[in-house]
Image (cartoon, helix red, strand yellow):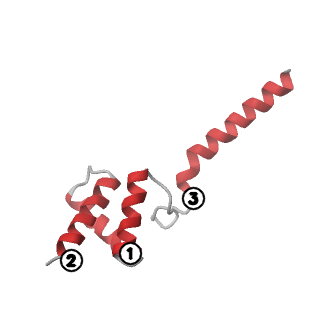
Amino acid sequence: MDALLLILLLAAFVWALLHATRNLRGSRSGVRAPGGGSRAERALEEELLRLTRGNRGAIERGVTAQRRRHPDASRADLLRRVRDEYLRDRTR
């Protein structure tokens, strides 16, 4: 019985550790790993990647510029602003 409890506690610890560190993968360069973040954020990134033909650098530069204007905004909100600005500029 004690061994089973110990195994369950160990499994819970490993799960919590993996859950807590899942967003750290691929973050050495300061760019988030694809698939990290909320669903809305991922959907916006995918849409922007389609619009920019895979130009992740342009997206990140746009996010950086928007972050300067709106430092308290979430990443999803910044991506939304980048998308809106891109679409507005594209129709001119």
Residue 4 screen position, x and y as percent: 83, 27
Q: In the drawing, does residue 85 fall left or right of residue 76?
A: left
Gap in Å between the C-alphas at discs 3 and 1?
A: 19 Å
The residue wearing badge 2 is 90
Check residue 25 in the rendering and tell me which mark sits there, or answer none.
3
Q: Secondary structure at mark 3?
A: loop
Q: Where is residue 54 shown, x and y percent of the image?
A: 42, 76
- Mark 3 and mark 1 residues within 8 Å of each other at the beta carbon: no
- Residue 57: mark: 1
Q: Is residue 65 above or below residue 21?
A: below
Instruction: Report helix, strand or loop for mark 1.
Output: helix
Secondary element at image label 2: helix
Quadrant the C terminus occupies: bottom left
Q: Quadrant of residue 66?
A: bottom left
Q: Quadrant of residue 8?
A: top right
Q: Earlier in the sequence, mark 2 or mark 1?
A: 1
Q: Give, as a three-letter code, the residue at label 2.
A: Arg
In this rendered view, identify the residue nearer to me: 72 or 49. Answer: 49
| Viewer-side residue, 82 vs 31 | 82
Q: Amino acid at mark 3?
A: Arg
Question: Badge 1: few (under 14), some or many (20 or more) residues near its Cα, within 10 Å?
Answer: few
Marks 2 and 3 sit apart, C-alpha to C-alpha, by 34 Å
Residue located at (22% from left, 55% from top)? 70
Mark 3 or mark 1: name the one nearer the start of the chain.
3
Q: Earlier in the sequence, mark 2 or mark 3?
A: 3
**Numbered disc total:** 3
Name the residue nearer the viewer: 8 or 46: 46
Seen from the viewer's position, the closer of residues 45 and 63 is 45
Q: Are marks 2 and 1 in contact (CB under 8 Å)?
A: no
50 shown above or below 66: below
